[in-house]
Image: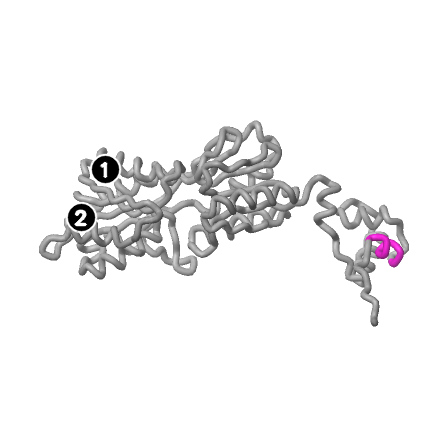
Amino acid sequence: MKKETSEPTMKDVAREAGVSLGTVSKVVNGLPVGSSYKTRVEKAIQKLNYQVNSYAQGLRSDKTRTIVLLIPNTKEPFYAALTYHINLALLQQNYRMLLCSTDYDSGLEQEYITMAQQNKVDGIIGLTYNPDLIISKHIPFVSIDRCIRSDIPCVSCDNFAGGQLAAEKLSELGCKNVAFLRKGSSLNNEPNKRKAGFENGCLSHGIHYEMKILNDHEPYTEFENFLTEHITDGHLSFDGIFCVTDGLAYFILKLLHKLNQKVPKDVQLIGFDGIQYFGSDYICSTIVQPISNIANMCVKLILDETSSEKSALICLPVTYAYGGTTLS
């Protein structure tokens, strides 16, 4: 029976290159050595197909150059875009991203955090829904959209300003009677401020508004019932609708077509997030989150070792974008 060959070691590389073990270590760790020595070591590494054990290397240097990202899923476009931009920002800093998809499972969120701590990662970026997360103070953590505690920075868009901007835009476009639609977690987080911002905008501009808010477990059919109740002689009483996500706005757009309501002629519709078809056209008129800026800020904070100087909450500005569901 043929004996299995073991993986080549750093000692094998040194022997092949005819240099000391210390010289190989310097080349592997990017430290300066003479060009001829470096060339010999690199040729030996290639010939032997030597693979650097980055985990063991990280343990020795107290850096694994790995950041964990906790995200609910990569199926929803907003989460997918956020994952893409965080990974890109980390790669630009020569860090790797370990993706952990939680599927909104609070227990799994805690398991992943424990796993990350045990594997000595350099930090965790998390968009989480567990209000009771236990996070060690010895590992850097940056939260997205939820303030966890005073020593953990939270990065978010300016959700209050976004809700207010939606109301202002509907008013500018002539809407007088509008609806606010929301479905989501009751957990206290930054996106909940979209409601307060929208209310403030409506009150400031003298717009009448009604709200329909569903919890996670309630079916979308409740929105159909709500809108149907506001149709008289085929005419919807609302001339404007604000949905707290583009995903919900897309569902409502299809529902309005089903109810024979013309968008934007009969009713104008604004979503929130800035989701685009294949990275080009917006799926609806929307309040755009600066996703790449959020990602870059998260990476900047997680790699910044001056933790005492980090702000507890960083809000980044939003913008409005036309997407065909409003008059302009």
Left or right: residue 267 versus residue 162 is left
The three-letter code of the residue at mark 2 reads Phe
Residue 180: percent from the left, percent from the top? Answer: 26, 44
Residue 21: percent from the left, percent from the top? Answer: 86, 49
Q: Which residue is mark 1?
A: 202
Q: How many marks?
A: 2
State the residue lying farthest toward the left: 233
Dot 2: few (<14), some (14–19), or many (≥20) neighbours within 10 Å?
many
Residue at figure coordinates x 33%, y 39% from the top left: 194
* Secondary structure, magenta segment, majority class: helix
Magenta segment range? 10-16
Residue 31 badge: none
The three-letter code of the residue at mark 1 reads Cys
Left or right: residue 141 versus residue 75 is right
State the residue lying farthest toward the bottom: 1
Q: Which residue is mark 2?
A: 238
The reply to whether callout 2 and callout 1 are in contact (CB within 8 Å) is no
